[in-house]
Amino acid sequence: AKRWQEKTEQLRQEENVKAAADQILRDTPDSDWATVIRAYKYANQGNWTEAEMLLKSLGESSQTQPFIRDLTSAVKS
């Protein structure tokens, strides 16, 4: 039962993150974070070229964010 509770909690957390990302895409579709979310989704689907193009459209200041920096690095690899 404990294993299923942990799995349920993990799935719930993943759904919360997905819902938050979708909310950003709806509320601020032209923001840098919306661009990052779209790039992440493309990368997750294996569309590295599109992800890289989106990430290149961000300013240099965005590279101070660890998630964006890591995503950019992963897409370029």
Image (cartoon, rainbow, N blue to C red):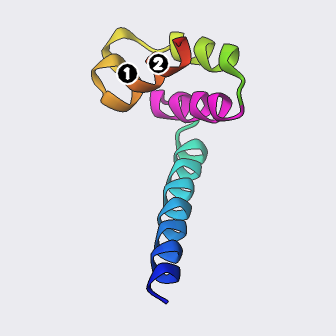
Q: Is residue 60 above or below residue 4?
A: above
Residue 72: mark: 2
Other-residue count near label 2 (Cα within 10 Å), few / some / many at <14 / 14–19 / ≥20: many
| Tags 1 and 2 touching, CB below 8 Å | yes
Mark 1 falls on what kind of element?
helix
Q: Is residue 34 above or below residue 27?
A: above
Mark 1 and mark 2: Cα distance apart in space: 5 Å
| Residue 32 forms part of the magenta stretch | yes
Magenta extent: 30-45
Residue at image point 52% right, 70% down: 12
Residue at image point 53% right, 81% down: 4
Query: Which residue is situated farthest in the bottom direction here?
Result: 1
Residue 5, x across and y down, in percent: 47, 82
The amino acid on which the numbered mark 1 sits, given as a three-letter code, is: Arg
Residue 35 position by quadrant = top right
Residue 34, x across and y down, in percent: 53, 34
